Amino acid sequence: MNSNLKIGAQVYVKDSIEAVEIYCRAFGAEISFEIRDDNGVFEHCELSINGQFFMCVSECGLFNESVSEETHLTMAFNVPGLGSEQAVRKAHDILSEGGKVLHLGARPWSAFCTDLVDKFGVFWWIAV
């Protein structure tokens, strides 16, 4: 087995252009690779932080995929190690606009963190 094997996170959202802008602002990420469709939305967009892969974003619905409306959270994007409460609050403030905050503060496993679902329906856990 390849010892360099790792899982890469990709989120499918409506309005991928806005999602990429918000995720870049929240985490200080930048676009490192992109493919857009004829309408200008992202078929595939890779975001990096300090030259390291962070996540991918794609427009949902481009390939006729569908998901039941009766779904629940089954996966979270975990972003530990932001380094400070201020950095967690910044990401929280940006991502919670139009979303739903589930928690902000200490947890038994983290001195300070947030759990939230952003306006694109993506569940985030972000911690110092």
Image (cartoon, rainbow, N blue to C red):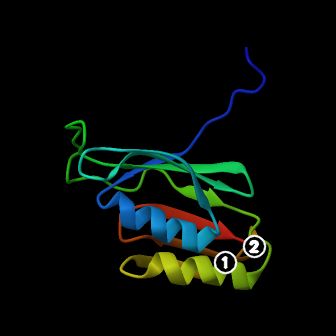
Question: Dot 2 lies on which element?
Answer: loop
Which amino acid type is marked by label 1? Val
Residue carrying label 1: 88
Q: Work out whether mark 2 precedes mark 1 in sequence or the reverse, and give the earlier one.
A: 1
Question: Dot 1 lies on which element?
Answer: helix
Observer-nearest of 62 and 85: 62
Q: CA distance from mark 2 to mark 1?
A: 6 Å
Residue 117 coordinates in the image, percent (x, y):
43, 69
> Which quadrant of the view contains residue 3?
top right
Residue 73 coordinates in the image, percent (x, y):
40, 56
Left or right relative to 113: residue 110: right
Q: Quick check: 92 above or below 13?
A: below
Report the quarter where the C terminus lies: bottom right
CB atoms of marks 2 and 1 within 8 Å: yes
Q: Residue at x 56, y 79 (%)?
A: 92
Q: Quick check: 93 above or below 46?
A: below
Residue 106 coordinates in the image, percent (x, y):
70, 80
Left or right relative to 34: residue 68: left
Q: Which mark is residue 9?
A: none
Left or right relative to 16: residue 90: right
Residue carrying label 2: 128
Observer-nearest of 107 and 60: 60
Observer-nearest of 18 and 119: 18
Does the rendering let one see residue 119?
Answer: yes
Report the quarter where the N terminus lies: top right
Q: Quick check: 37 above or below 3?
A: below
Does the rendering let one see residue 105?
Answer: no
Q: Residue at x 62, y 58 (%)?
A: 78
Farthest top residue in view:
1
Which amino acid type is marked by label 2? Val
Residue 91 coordinates in the image, percent (x, y):
59, 76
Q: Residue at x 57, y 73 (%)?
A: 26
